[in-house]
Image: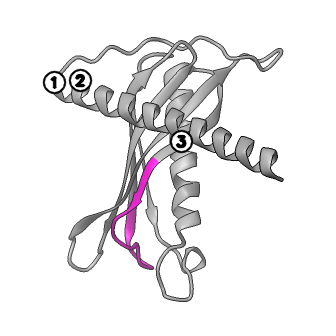
Amino acid sequence: MPGQQRETTFRFLAQPSDVNFGGKVHGGMVMKWIDQAGYAAAVGWSGQYCVTVAVGGIQFVKPILIGDIVVVRCKLIRTGSSSMHFAIDVIARDLRSGQERLATHCMISFVALDAPDGRPAPVPAWVPQSEDDRILASYAEKIIAMSREQQAELERVRHDIERNG
């Protein structure tokens, strides 16, 4: 039921096919997991087909190794009229010691689309309930603002290159 599922968690084992020559999981593989878990969370909240719009503030904090249990936690932290923004933590847990470590963190944004023509579709509004919710919503606003600034800077650079080229 739309507007009910605020959090989604994926759990699985890091496999040999996920790693690079250094024996650590590829950053691109981690980004794939983030996108898959984020998509499940976005569909769970909106009840509609969704597309990824942006990934912001991604930080690869610690490596993930073969045999680690990987936990991808997605939590809705902001909604717009058709957009949803999720904080994502990727946790790695060593099977032998049981120790967990934050491997990656980011915010991922999705837009819900309607079925007939693929236009943005409204999503259920989410309202922060706790102080932690308000902190996360503020964090989302800051990441969104930085993304807009980055886009504006890219447009300025492209314009300057076109003018000089």
Q: Amino acid at mark 2?
A: Arg
Numbered circle sitting on residue 134: 2
In the drawing, does residue 32 fall left or right of residue 8?
Answer: right
Residue visible at 49% across and 88% down?
22
Corner quadrant of residue 134: top left
Instruction: Tell which tag, 3 or 1, sits nearer the viewer.
Output: 3
Q: Is residue 7 visible?
A: yes
Query: What residue did someone put label 3 on?
Result: 150
Please say if 11 is above or below 29.
Answer: above
**The magenta stretch spans which residues?**
57-70
In the displayed orientation, state which residue is furthest to the front.
Answer: 164
Numbered circle sitting on residue 131: 1
Residue 66 painted magenta: yes
Residue 10 at x, y percent in the picture: 44, 50
Residue 87 at x, y percent in the picture: 38, 40
Q: Element under label 3?
A: helix
Q: Amino acid at mark 3?
A: Gln
Please say if 2 is above or below 16.
Answer: above
Instruction: Tell which tag, 3 or 2, sits nearer the viewer.
Output: 3
Q: Are marks 2 and 1 in contact (CB under 8 Å)?
A: yes
Residue visible at 51% across and 51% down?
34
Measured in 3D between alpha carbons, the distance from the residue under mark 3 to the one under mark 2, in whole angstroms, is 24 Å
State the count of labels. Answer: 3
Residue 96 painted magenta: no
Mark toward the start of the polypeptide (3 vs 2): 2
Q: Element under label 2?
A: helix
- Crowding at mark 2 (Cα within 10 Å: few <14, some 14-19, many 20+): some
Residue visible at 32% across and 26% down?
137
